[in-house]
Image: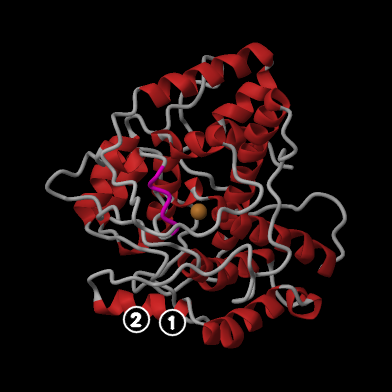
C-alpha cells in the first residue's frame, strides 16, 4: 500500500487517527464530538414530522456515527472532494489557479467540461480509493461505539445485491414534487421498477461479471460505477428531505447555513449530506466490494498498485500536532471559489456511458 494511505486516513478520519493514537485520544475525540454537537444551533432544519420515513435499515447506524458524519468537517470534505474533481475541466483558468493555490487541484478530473464522464484517466480509482477510506473511517467509529456500548454492529455491511423493488427492508422511497419538471421526471424514472429491471440489473450484472471485469482497468471500472449505478442508487433511494440545500450562493459564497448541518439533513442526493444517511453505507459497501471482484478477475492476490489515491487537500493541519482542519480555511475559501465559478454537479446529472 502506498505511503499516501496514511495521510489519506489522517485526512479523512480524525476518529480513525484518534483510534490509532490510543484510548485517551479516542476519549478526547468523543468529547470533541460532543462539544461539536452541543455547538450545533437548535435545529432550524425542519424535521418533517408529517413526512413518512422509510423503515430504518436494520441495524440502525448508531447516533454517534450519524452525528460524526453530520459534522461540518466531514460534510465539507465530501462536498468539496466531489465538487472539485467533477467541476475541474469546466472551471475557468482563474478558478483553477485559485484552487491549485489552495492545494486542492485534483490530479485526475472525473468529468469533461461538457459533463461527460472520463473513464480512461484513472479518476475512477480515486473514486474507489477515497470512498474505501471513508468506509475505514466509519468502521473505526462503529468499532469504537460498539465496544463502548456492547453493540454487535461494529462494521459496515454492504448490500450483497441491489435491493429489488419488492425488498421489504429497503423499499424505494416515493418520488415527490421537487418544483422542477426535469428533476421530477428523473426521480420518477430512476425510482421505477422498469429502471431497476432494464437498467440497474444489467449494470449490476456487468460490474460483477468476471469476464467483463477482466477487460477493464480498475480506473475504468470505478468511473463506470461512479457515473452509472452509483449516482442512480443515490437518487433511487433518496427521500424527500423537505428542503434541499441550494447550490452555494455566489453572492454569499463563503458560507453554508448551519441549518444544513443538522443530522436530520441526510439527503442522499447531496454530497454535503449523503454520508449521514445509513443507506449511503449500503451503496458504498456494494461499490467497495467490486474492488475485490476486480482483483479476483485479474488474479491479484496482494495489494493493489493504486494509481488514483487522491483524497483531497494534502496539507491539512500538522499531522504531528493534531487532527486535520477540514471545514476550516482554506476550505471556506475554496467553497467561495467554487460558488463564484457557478459550476455545480449533482448525482442526478447521470450520463449514459457506452
Ligand atoms: Cu462520495
Is residue 295 or residue 205 the one in the foreground?
A: 205
Q: Could one spot residue 150 in this view of the protein? A: yes
Above-or-below relation of 84 to 164 = above
Above-or-below relation of 269 to 172 = above
Q: Residue furthest left?
A: 251
Q: Residue at x 47, y 31 (%)?
A: 315
Q: In which quadrant of the rendered view does residue 180 lie?
A: bottom left
Q: Is residue 143 magenta?
A: no
Q: Position of residue 13 (x, y in %)?
A: 57, 33
Task: Say few, some or many: other residues with alpha carbon within 10 Å of mark 1 (under 14 / 14 to 19 / 20 or more).
Answer: some
Q: Position of residue 167 (x, y in %)?
A: 64, 70
Q: How is the image coloured?
A: secondary structure
Q: Secondary structure at mark 2?
A: helix
Secondary structure mostly seen in magenta is: loop
Q: In which quadrant of the rendered view does residue 109 lie?
A: bottom left
Instruction: Quote the CA–CA distance across marks 2 and 1.
Output: 6 Å
The C terminus is located in which quarter?
Answer: bottom right
Q: Residue at x 55, y 20 (%)?
A: 29
Task: Say few, some or many: other residues with alpha carbon within 10 Å of mark 2 (under 14 / 14 to 19 / 20 or more).
Answer: few
Q: Which residue is mark 2?
A: 185
Is residue 129 or residue 93 the one in the foreground?
A: 129
**For the magenta stretch, what is the residue range?**
264-268
Q: Disc 2, ligand 1: is the CB inside 8 Å? A: no
Is residue 92 or residue 321 the one in the foreground?
A: 321
- 2 and 1 marks in contact (CB < 8 Å): yes
Q: Which residue is mark 1?
A: 189
Above-or-below relation of 241 to 199 = above
Q: Residue at x 56, y 50 (%)?
A: 278
Q: Residue at x 80, y 75 (%)?
A: 210
Amino acid at each position: 500500500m502506498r505511503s499516501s494511505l496514511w495521510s489519506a486516513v489522517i485526512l479523512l478520519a480524525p476518529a480513525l487517527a484518534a483510534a490509532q493514537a490510543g484510548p485517551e485520544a479516542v476519549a478526547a475525540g468523543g468529547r470533541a464530538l460532543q462539544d461539536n454537537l452541543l455547538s450545533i444551533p437548535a435545529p432550524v432544519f425542519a424535521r418533517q414530522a408529517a413526512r413518512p420515513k422509510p423503515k430504518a435499515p436494520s441495524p440502525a447506524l448508531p447516533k454517534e456515527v450519524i452525528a460524526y458524519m453530520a459534522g461540518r468537517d466531514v460534510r465539507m470534505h465530501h462536498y468539496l472532494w466531489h465538487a472539485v474533481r467533477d467541476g475541474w475541466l469546466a472551471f475557468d483558468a482563474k478558478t483553477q489557479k485559485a484552487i491549485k493555490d489552495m492545494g486542492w487541484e485534483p490530479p485526475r478530473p472525473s468529468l469533461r467540461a461538457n459533463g461527460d464522464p472520463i473513464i480512461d484517466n484513472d479518476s475512477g480509482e480515486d473514486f474507489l480509493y477515497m470512498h474505501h477510506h471513508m468506509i475505514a473511517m466509519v468502521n473505526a467509529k462503529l468499532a469504537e461505539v460498539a465496544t463502548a456500548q456492547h453493540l454487535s454492529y461494529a462494521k459496515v455491511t454492504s448490500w450483497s445485491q441491489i435491493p429489488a423493488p419488492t425488498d421489504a427492508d429497503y423499499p424505494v422511497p416515493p418520488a415527490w414534487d421537487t418544483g422542477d419538471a426535469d428533476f421530477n421526471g428523473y426521480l420518477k424514472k430512476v425510482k421505477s421498477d422498469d429502471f431497476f429491471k432494464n437498467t440497474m440489473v444489467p449494470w449490476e450484472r456487468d460490474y460483477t461479471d468476471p469476464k467483463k471485469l477482466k477487460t477493464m482497468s480498475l480506473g475504468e471500472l470505478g468511473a463506470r460505477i461512479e457515473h452509472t449505478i452509483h449516482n442512480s442508487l443515490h437518487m433511487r433511494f433518496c427521500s424527500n428531505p423537505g428542503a434541499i440545500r441550494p447550490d452555494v450562493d455566489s453572492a454569499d459564497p463563503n458560507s453554508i447555513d448551519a441549518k444544513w448541518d443538522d443530522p436530520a439533513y441526510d439527503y442522499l442526493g447531496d454530497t454535503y449530506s449523503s454520508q449521514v444517511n445509513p443507506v449511503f453505507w449500503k451503496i458504498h459497501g456494494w461499490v467497495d466490494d467490486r474492488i475485490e471482484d476486480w482483483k479476483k478477475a485479474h488474479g491479484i492476490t496482494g495489494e493493489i498498485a493504486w494509481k488514483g489515491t487522491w483524497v483531497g487537500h494534502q496539507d491539512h493541519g500538522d499531522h504531528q500536532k493534531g487532527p486535520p482542519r477540514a471545514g476550516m480555511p482554506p476550505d471556506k475559501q475554496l467553497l467561495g471559489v467554487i460558488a463564484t465559478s457557478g459550476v455545480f454537479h449533482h448525482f442526478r446529472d447521470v450520463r449514459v456511458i457506452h
